[in-house]
Amino acid sequence: MSSIGELILGLVPNNVSSDIHTIAALFFFVGAACYGLSYGVTELKSNTLPRYLGYSGFLMSMPFLTFSSSLFIITIFPALTYNPAIWEWLSYFSIIGWALVHGIFMFKEKNV
């Protein structure tokens, strides 16, 4: 779901079709949030991984869910002048942070 949304985002810029771009963005951001939540739940269930890895998945999902919700609301109510771009950037940095936390853990624990 997320990959298809990202593909469409790349193929259809906002200035070509804002409707298609917005729908694709919703697919991408909701899908990425689902990935983070799934990883978080799976890592929390594991007995070999530290709990902070699982919690990082939930933290990573929060900006994605906030941006998706904001995008959905301003699509339904176009008169709102709210610009959720800050959440889009926070989503980007949260997934970079999530990958960094996991990378550092894997570097330290090469036997996991």
Image (cartoon, rainbow, N blue to C red):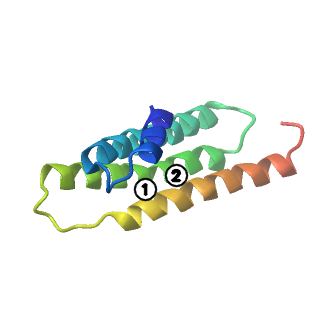
User: Where is residue 21 drawn, in percent x and y?
Assistant: 33, 47
Per the image, the residue denoted by label 1 is 63
Residue at image point 39% right, 41% down = 30
User: Where is residue 36 drawn, in percent x and y?
Assistant: 52, 42
Amino acid type of the residue tagged 2 in the rendering = Met
Determine whether the residue tagged by mark 2 lies in a helix, strand or loop.
helix
Q: Quadrant of the C terminus?
A: top right
Q: Quadrant of the N terminus?
A: top left
Residue at image point 85% right, 45% down = 109
Give the residue furthest to the right.
111
| Residue 8, visible in the rendered structure | yes
Q: Is residue 85 above or below residue 65?
A: below
Q: Is residue 94 above or below residue 1?
A: below
Asked if residue 48 lies left or right of residue 19, the reply is right
Tag 2–tag 1 contact (CB < 8 Å): yes
Amino acid type of the residue tagged 1 in the rendering = Pro
Asked if residue 57 lies left or right of residue 89, the reply is right
Q: Give the camera-side residue of 98 and 20.
A: 20
Image label count: 2
Give the residue furthest to the front.
16
Determine whether the residue tagged by mark 1 lies in a helix, strand or loop.
helix
| Badge 1: residue crowd in 10 Å (few <14, some 14–19, many ≥20) | many
Residue 60 circle label: 2
